[in-house]
Image: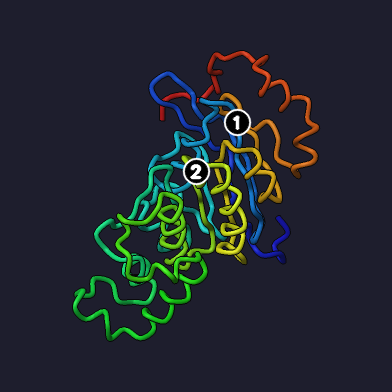
């Protein structure tokens, strides 16, 4: 990259992951510009979840490097990566069920505001945290549910709350893992503009099986198959890509490839 240009928001260089003798991720190179929205798609077993786990620090790569805003993050713990500016949601909803919507969001931003482990009884006096939690609650369209316990929200509302918690840390790079999983078609249609609005100005990577969501949100689409990156291009170019069509038609061999990476 030109040294006069800002660093990529996220960059993967020669990324490999092997479990035992099985190669899951095979030498992926990927560079995402700040502010881009990237959909990551691929057949079941393509390596999408493993890729997210490598980026977010849940797995260490067998080989290769991961950079966040120009700083190397592979080998760091998930909490360290989060503090460096990357936040991730999961396919299974991860919220505090016995706290209100407002308290869920406020707790999500405490570390960013420098409060770390603040006693809960003192939170009412944290004017900046309260104001920002209110603004975030409106951003994810849950302001009418301010005092509702998270466990009493509808499923789609819980997913919206988790989205709010994910961006509460102020991270510049957001990973969303199946954000519309389990939603009805009507809920999904309403959730697409909410994701777009809530992640405005941030870099977004999203694993999603619903192609309507992917093509409705993504500026670029990365296609994985058998641990390899088949394509990384605009939605229109990916839709017309013969290799992508073949992978989704099931014509590609289902055996896992040998990446040629020895034990590390």
Q: Residue 145, position in %: x, y?
A: 39, 67
Q: Nearer the viewer, residue 213 or 154?
A: 154
Mark 1 against mark 2, which lies toward the viewer? 2
Q: Which residue is mark 2?
A: 183
Q: Earlier in the sequence, mark 1 or mark 2?
A: 1
Give whichever of 157, 255 is nearer the camera: 157
- Quick one: 94 or 234, which is closer to the camera? 94
How many numbered discs? 2
Query: For residue 106, which quarter of the picture?
Result: bottom left
Rendered image: mark on residue 99: none
Relative image position of residue 184 (x, y in whole percent): 52, 42
State the residue at coordinates (62%, 13%): 253
Residue at image point 71% right, 51% down: 219
> Vertical placement of 140 versus 55: above or below?
below
Question: Which quarter of the figure is the C terminus placed in?
Answer: top left
> Could you say where residue 245 lies in the image, as x and y percent from the top left?
73, 25
Q: Residue at x 66, y 24 (%)?
A: 248
Q: Is residue 141 above or below residue 97?
A: below
Which residue is found at the position 79% from the left and 41% from the top? 236
* Residue ID for mark 1: 42
């Amino acid at each position: 990259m030109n040294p006069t240009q800002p660093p990529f928001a996220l960059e993967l260089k020669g990324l490999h992951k092997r479990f035992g003798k099985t190669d899951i991720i095979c030498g992926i190179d990927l560079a995402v510009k700040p502010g881009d929205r990237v959909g990551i798609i691929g057949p079941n077993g393509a390596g999408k979840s493993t890729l997210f786990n490598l980026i977010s620090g849940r797995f260490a790569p067998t080989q290769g490097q991961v950079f966040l805003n120009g700083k190397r993050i592979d080998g760091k713990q998930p909490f360290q990566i989060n503090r460096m500016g990357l936040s991730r949601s999961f396919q299974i909803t991860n919220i505090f069920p016995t706290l209100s919507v407002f308290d869920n969001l406020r707790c999500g931003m405490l570390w960013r505001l420098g409060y770390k482990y603040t006693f809960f009884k003192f939170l009412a006096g944290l004017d900046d945290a309260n104001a920002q939690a209110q603004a975030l609650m409106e951003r994810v369209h849950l302001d009418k549910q301010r005092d509702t316990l998270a466990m009493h929200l509808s499923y789609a509302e819980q997913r919206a709350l988790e989205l709010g918690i994910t961006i509460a840390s102020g991270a510049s790079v957001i990973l969303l893992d199946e954000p519309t999983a389990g939603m009805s078609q009507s809920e999904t249609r309403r959730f697409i503009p909410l994701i777009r609005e809530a992640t405005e100005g941030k870099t977004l990577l999203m694993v999603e099986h619903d192609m309507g969501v992917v093509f409705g949100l993504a500026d670029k689409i990365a296609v994985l198959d058998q641990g390899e990156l088949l394509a990384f291009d605009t939605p229109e170019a990916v839709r017309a890509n013969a290799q992508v069509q073949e992978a989704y038609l099931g014509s590609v061999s289902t055996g896992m490839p040998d990446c040629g990476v020895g034990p590390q």
